[in-house]
Image: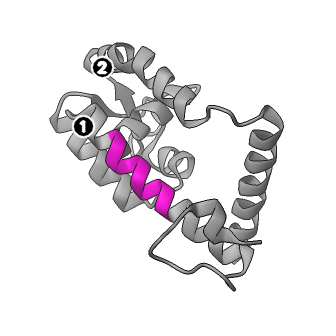
Amino acid sequence: MDYNELYESKTVDFSGIPAPFFLLGLLSAFDNSYQATADAFFGEISWKQVFAIVCIDMCRESPTLRELSQVMGSSHQNVKQILLKLEKKGFVTMRADEKDKRKQRIFLTQKAREFSASHDEQSQQIVSRIFAGIPEEELDVTIQTILHMERNLKTL
């Protein structure tokens, strides 16, 4: 496949790059692009901090640091740094678990909930624009592919 036509790059020659390497590079480049765009959009906090808030909110109960690290797919140390910044800005609180005082549970504050609510509609519009014209079947295949890649990655 001619990735130069797909990617429309005038700077790089992608010919001869095997599909798995091209896909990994493409995912990394997209992640960087999306992060820069999201950082500018949210302003007050970074995309990684927003992602942490979203992940905390998705958990059935307030997660521990270990649980949140697993959900975010990031190291304990990286997530701890994100949480410390969010705590300093008043978006989360961390309290000892009622059953096991060695564990800390992470809670969203009212400020985090208001922040999410105030950005929800515009976030929905942005995501809709990003995925405009992509059929549901292609999204399903992409999701299945990335989940399969993630399972394979865990075996390394």
Q: Position of residue 122 (x, y in %)?
A: 40, 19
Residue for badge 2: 115
Q: Residues within 10 Å of mark 1 (few under 14, many from 20)?
A: some
- Looking at the image, which residue sits at the far bottom? 16
Judging by the rendered image, the residue that carries numbered circle 1 is: 45
Q: Is residue 79 magenta?
A: no
Q: Residue at x 51, y 48 (%)?
A: 72
Residue 122 visible in the current orientation: yes
Specify the quadrant of the image occupied by residue 153. bottom right
Query: Looking at the rendering, in which quadrant would you find the C terminus?
Result: bottom right
Q: Amino acid at mark 2?
A: Phe
Task: In this rendered view, identify the residue nearer to me: 84 or 123.
Answer: 123
Q: Is residue 104 above or below residue 76?
A: above
Callout 2 crowding tier (Cα within 10 Å): few <14, some 14–19, many ≥20: some
| Camera-side residue of 23 and 61 | 23
Camera-nearest residue between 66 and 115 = 115
What secondary structure is found at the residue carrying circle 2? helix
Residue shown at 32% from the left, 33% from the top: 95
Residue 32 painted magenta: yes
Say what amino acid the circle numbered 1 marks.
Answer: Ile
Residues tagged 1 and 2 counted as in contact (Cβ below 8 A): yes
Whole-percent x, y for residue 73 in the image? 54, 55
Query: What is the CA distance from the residue labelled 1 to the residue labelled 2?
Result: 10 Å
Q: Is residue 148 left or right of residue 117?
A: right
The chief SS type of the magenta part is helix
Mark 1 and mark 2 lie on one chain; the one further toward the N terminus is 1
Give percent across and percent down for residue 99: 48, 32
* Quadrant of the image containing the N terminus: bottom right
Q: Which residues are magenta?
A: 29-38
| Tag shown at residue 83 | none
Q: Residue at x 69, y 86 (%)?
A: 16
Locate residue 36, reporting x and y percent. Answer: 33, 49
